[in-house]
Every structure is written in structure tokens, then in C-alpha cells.
Amino acid sequence: MKKFGFIGLGIMGNAMALNLVKAGLDVTVWNRNSEKCSALVAQGAKQGNTPREVAEACDITFTIVSDPTAALAICEGPDGVVAGIGEGRSYIDMSTVDDATSQKISAAITEAGGRFLEAPVSGTKKPAEDGTLIILAAGDKSVYDDALPAFEIMGKMSPYLGEIGQGAKMKLVVNMIMGGMLSIFSEGVSLGLKADLDGEQLLEIIAAGAMANPMFAVKGPMLLAEQYDTSFPLKHMQKDMRLAVDLGDQLDLSLPTAATSNESFKQARKAGYADEDIAAIYKTVK
Ligand code: NAP
């Protein structure tokens, strides 16, 4: 039986790894704060002491951590994934990072004899729990083929997008649109309430028309209730907006709406809402 590693047991990683364990796969986990491993170990996972140990012990190791700095930190050093990967083993980074970070990790893994795939995910805590993520894979096609059964447990759709970087870029474009939508949605709800409109009616009218979408359906009631339980930490959304705006810079493309939304998310971070849900952007707007 194939052995799978899972590094990074935050909101997303915990739910994704749990689905692999529940499906009966042989899973070894690691998280920087080791307390987060306990629930998975109680469900039958093994625990590695370092990312290196996990990569050494497993045929395919998945990672999903915060940002480019974290994704690189997991790989580097004597205890990192690169030190453990070796011939014949595979590494799949599912974190949302930029193209350049993914290329760097890919080069380090392949130089060490391993195979690499990037596979950032679209979908938040609930789809991660339900195994209905959209997995945006790119890189070594043979790793993709080997990982597909595990992707099918974690997600509902796993398109293969081509060369390294294409998954990272697809993810940034998707999230840039999402961040912009949430930003203008927060402004619209704020304006409506200040103008003495009924919030519930406003949401019903939006939901009945061409702008209806699952995100507004979930986040709208959160705004009205001023309830910001975290599914997607606001700090990660701001990171995604920053990386998307950077990508625009690299491609000499002007992205004024995304740049302004990025500033709104930066303001919300600065106001202390970094670890709250992305919906907390509303607090800086209203
Ligand atoms: P999270 O709950 O904040 O978890 C972050 C994870 O990264 C934790 O396991 C954390 O370890 C680890 N980490 C951070 N810095 C590290 C470092 N320097 N070294 C080692 N580990 C480090 O985040 P999340 O919501 O699961 O998101 C994870 C990734 O998925 C991000 O790239 C995010 O943009 C992306 N994503 C999130 C969602 C969502 O809705 N939440 C949806 C799609 C994609 P500790 O526990 O030790 O802090």
C-alpha cells in the first residue's frame, strides 16, 4: 500500500488529511505546532517528527501551509522535505503561493531526485471537510496520475493545468476575483444599511438575480450578523491579492480594482482582523 505524508494541519490541512485517513489510507502527519497532530493520530494517522522524516517515509507527501515563506521553510534545512525526498518519492505542495516560489521548490525537489507537483486548492473549510475541493494541479504529470486517487478523496475536480506555475497562477486569478467581489459586496451591504435598506431584503434581491453566487449566499448572512468565524483567514486572502497584483506587475498589466481591494484587505489586517474570516473586511468598510 502506498504511504502518504501530510504536512500542515491548519484549517485546510486538518480537514484534507482527515479525509485521507478516513478513506483508509496510510497517512503520516507533521505540523509545526505538534498539538494539532493529536486529533489525526487519534483517527489512525502516524506522526513524523520533522518534514524530512515524513518525506523519507512516504511515497507521496502533501503540504498545505500559509504562504511562500512557510512553503519554503518546510522544504529547507537539515529537517526539511528536500533533505528527505530522495529518488522515487514525490512532493505535492497545495499551498497558495506565487509562480516563482513554486519554481524554486520544484527545482530543489527535482535536484534532490524527487518528483514535484503544485496543486493549490479552490474551496474553503467546508469543501475541505466535505472532500469537494477544486484541485489545481500542474507539474510532473506522472505525480498527478499517481496522486489522482487521493485527489479524488479530497476534491470534486482536479484539472491538470500543464507546466509548473500554471496551477499557482490559476489559483491567484480565481482568488483575485473572489477578493474583489467580497470587497465590493461589503461596500454594497454597508451602503444599503446606511441608506436604511433592509439587509435581508438586499441579500434576497441579490440572490434572485444574475449576481447570485455561493460566496455571497454564505458571507451575506455573516456580514448582517457581524459574525466572522474563520473559514478562510483574512491574512491569507490579502496575501493572495498581493501575489495577484505582483503577477500583474510582472506581466505589465494594470489591475486597478484588485490593487484597491488589496489595500482594503491590508487595512483590515492592520486593524487587527488578520485571523478572522475574510468577511471581516466588512468591519473596515461599514
Ligand atoms: P491556517 O489555518 O492559517 O494554517 C496555516 C498552516 O501553515 C498551519 O499548519 C501552520 O502551522 C503552517 N505554517 C505557517 N507558517 C509556517 C512555517 N514557517 N513553518 C511551518 N509551518 C508553518 O491556513 P489555512 O486556511 O489552512 O490555509 C493554508 C493554505 O491554503 C494557505 O496558502 C491559504 O491561502 C490556502 N487556502 C486556504 C483556504 C481557506 O479557505 N482556509 C482555501 C483555499 C486555499 P502552525 O499550526 O504551527 O501555525
Image (tube, helix red, strand yellow):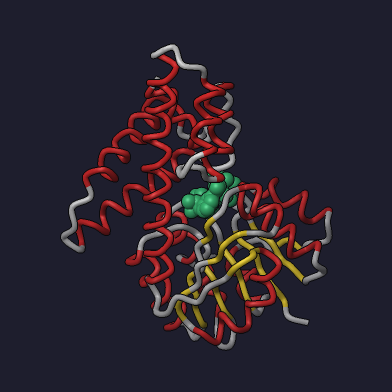
Q: Is residue 116 visible?
A: yes
Image position of 199 with respect to 28: above or below? above
Query: Residue 163 appears in which quarter of the rendering?
Result: bottom left
86 vs 259, left or right, is right
Residue 61 picture location, percent across and down: 61, 71
User: In which quadrant will I find the C terminus?
Assistant: top left
Image position of 128 with respect to 20: above or below? above
Image position of 239 with respect to 113: above or below? above
How many badges with numbers are in the image? 0
Q: Residue at x 40, y 68 (%)?
A: 102
Query: Residue 27 appears in which quarter of the rendering?
Result: bottom right
Residue 192 picture location, percent across and down: 42, 20
Q: Residue at x 59, y 41 (%)?
A: 231
User: In which quadrant will I find the N terminus?
Assistant: bottom right
Image position of 10 with respect to 25: above or below? above
Q: Residue at x 83, y 53 (%)?
A: 42
Residue 268 picture location, percent across and down: 39, 29
242 vs 220, left or right, is left
Q: Residue furthest left?
A: 252
279 vs 48, left or right, is left
Residue 86 picture location, percent across and down: 55, 83
